[in-house]
Amino acid sequence: MQAFDVIVIGSGAAGLTAAWHARAEGASVLVVNKGMAGRTGATITTGGGISIAGQTLRALGLPGDPDDSEEDFLVDTLRAGQFLGDQSLVQSMVTGIGAEIARLVALKTPMRFMKRAPGHSSGRGVHISGPDIQRIQLQAAVGPGVRFLENFQSSGLLQDREGRVVGVTGLDRTTGEVKSFAANAIVLATGGTTSNWSLRTAPEELTGDGHAMALQAGAELIEMEMLQFLPCCLVAPEMWRGLQFPWILGPQSGIRAWLLNKYGERFMARWDPERMELSTRDMVAFASANEVVEGRGSPNGGVYLSWAHLPRDILDNYFRISSSVSADWRWEGFDMTPLVERIRAGHAIEVAPAAHFSIGGIRINDAGETGVPGLFVGGETAGGLHGGNRLSGNAGAQVLVQGKNAGIAAARFAQQNATHAQPGNDAELKDRILAPLTRRDGAAPSETKQRLTRLAERSLSPVREAVSIKAGLDELADIVANDIPHLSTRQSERPWNRDWTDALECQAAVHVLHAALISAEARTSSLGAHRRRDQPTTSDAPLSHGLVRRAPDLVQHRFEPVAFSLVSPAA
C-alpha cells in the first residue's frame, strides 16, 4: 500500500490550495480526484467572485474601498446568515483571504475588481474565472511535486483500531481496481451535495461522497438542512437546464427584469415590495417555488422572467456592463444567442430555483480539524461558516482560506504524528465497494439515483413542510432497505463501469439526504435558506446549530446554542 504524509481528496480550488500549502510545509502529498484534475468539480463552473474587504485590498496595493473594513465584511456575512454562522470561521475567512489573494497575484492570476454585490455593504471583492483559478492552482501544485491520481472514486476512510484516519479506499475507474492508500492525514475537499437535485447549477460529481465518508468515520455534520438555491435558472430546453444565465442577465446584474406567474402577476410584491426581484437569493428562490406549489407556475414547473417592458437598448448594451458576457452573447462557453433572440422578441423565459451551494457540511474549527484524529476538511465540504445563507463571493473566499488552513494543519499533524498502524476496516470497505459488481439481478443504480433525486426535489426544495419532509424520510427508508443492499451492475467489465460508479454514489447519497431530512424535520421554523410553509416565521427561541452524528446503530440529531463570541444579533 503506497503511503503519503497527506492525501487530499478533491482537486477544486480548496483541494489544490490545501495540497500546495501542505507541500510547502514539507509533506509528501497525493491528490486523488473523482474525475480529471482541473476539469471537474464546482470550481471550474464558478462565477469567480472572491470577497475581500476593501482595506485589505488596498494593503496589497490593489484597488478597494478605503472605508470597507474587515469588521464590516464580518458583520455583513453574519447578518446574511441570520447570525447562525460560526463566528470563528467567519473571522478566519475575513482575516485570511488577503494572504491567498496576494499568493494568486504573485502567480500572475488574471483578476478583475468587482462592483458591489447583493448583500454586501461595499463593492468588495475580486473576480477570477473558474477556469483561470483551476489552471493557476493546478500549475502551482504540480511545480513543487504534488502527485495526482485522477478518476479515483474515494468511497471510505481507513481507520485504525483507535479511530484515527490512516488512509482512503476507493475505485480506480480506469482499471476497475479497488485500491487503498495510506496517509498520516487526510484532507476532504470533495465539494458539496448539489448533484442529488436534478435542477442544479453544479456538475454531476457533487454527490456528497466526502460528507458520507466523514459521517461514517465519526465526524459531525452541521446545518445540513441549509442548501442555497439560485433563482432564475433555466428549466428548458433540457440541454440548458440549470444554467444561471437568466439570473446573470437579470437580477444578479441589477437589470430590472420582472418575475411573473402564469397570470402575469409580479408575485415578488407579496414578499419584498421594496426590492422586488432584487431581493435576497433565498427570498426570490422561496417566492418562485411557492408560486409553483400553489398552482401558479409555468408549464415546465417554473415561473416566468420577462424583459419585455425594457427598451431593447438595455439588453443590446449589456455586454458593456458585464465582463462575463461577450458582444456575440457567449457566456461560460455557451452560445446564448437563441435565448437572447427570444427575449428580444418579447417572450418570457421559464426559470426556477436550482440547487447551487451546500451551506451545511462537515463541522470543523478554523484549522479545518473535525475532531476525528487525522481528518481535516475545507471548502464547500465544510459547514458552519455561512449559517443560514451565503453571500455572493464568500464561497470563493471560503475555499481558499479553508483549503490553506486544512492543508497546513494536516501537514503538521502528519509530520508530528507519523503512524504505521494498520487499518481495521480495510476489508469491510473493499467488500462494500465490490458488492454491486457481484450482483447481476437487483436494483439498477441509475434508477435508484433517479428515486433519490426525485425525493430531494420534493422534500428538500426551497419550499418545505412537515408532510413532505416525512414523506421523504419514509421513501428514503424504503430505498435503504430495498434498493441499497441490492444494487447491481448490468455488466461485468470493471473499467469505466458506470453502473458501478452510480452504485457507489447511491451508497453515499443516502447518508447525505438522511442527514438533511432529519435536520429539516428538527428545525420546525423558517430560518435563512430553510423555508417552512407550515411555519413561515423564525422561532423566538435562542439560535442553535443543528448537528448530526452517527451513533453505533443510528444517526442522531441534536441542537447546540450558537456562541456569539464576536458580534451579537442585537448589536
Image (cartoon, rainbow, N blue to C red):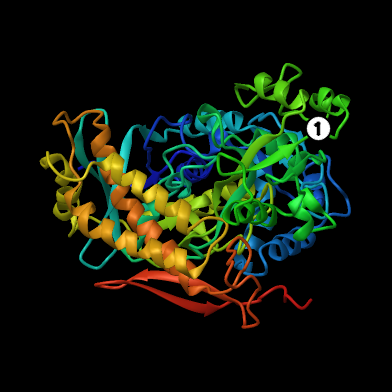
2 relative to 379 in the view: left or right: left
- Kindly indicate the quadrant of the structure image that contains residue 255: top right
Q: Position of residue 352 (x, y in %)?
A: 61, 44
Vertical placement of 92 versus 176: above or below? below
Q: How many numbered dots are placed on residues in this image?
A: 1
Amino acid type indicated by mark 1: Ala
Vertical placement of 250 versus 364: above or below? above
Q: Position of residue 450 (x, y in %)?
A: 36, 44
* Residue 451 vs residue 395, the one in the foreground: 451
Q: Position of residue 154 (x, y in %)?
A: 31, 44
> Residue at 22% of width from left, 60% of height from top?
481
> Residue at 66% of width from left, 33% of height from top?
245
Inspect this view and state whether residue 416 appears: no
> Residue at 59% of width from left, 34% of height from top?
243
* Residue 239 vs residue 439, the one in the foreground: 239
> Residue at 49% of width from left, 67% of height from top?
520
Report the residue marked by disc 1: 308
Vertical placement of 140 versus 27: above or below? above
Q: Which part of the image, by quadrant, shows the N terminus?
A: top left
Q: Position of residue 219 (x, y in %)?
A: 38, 65
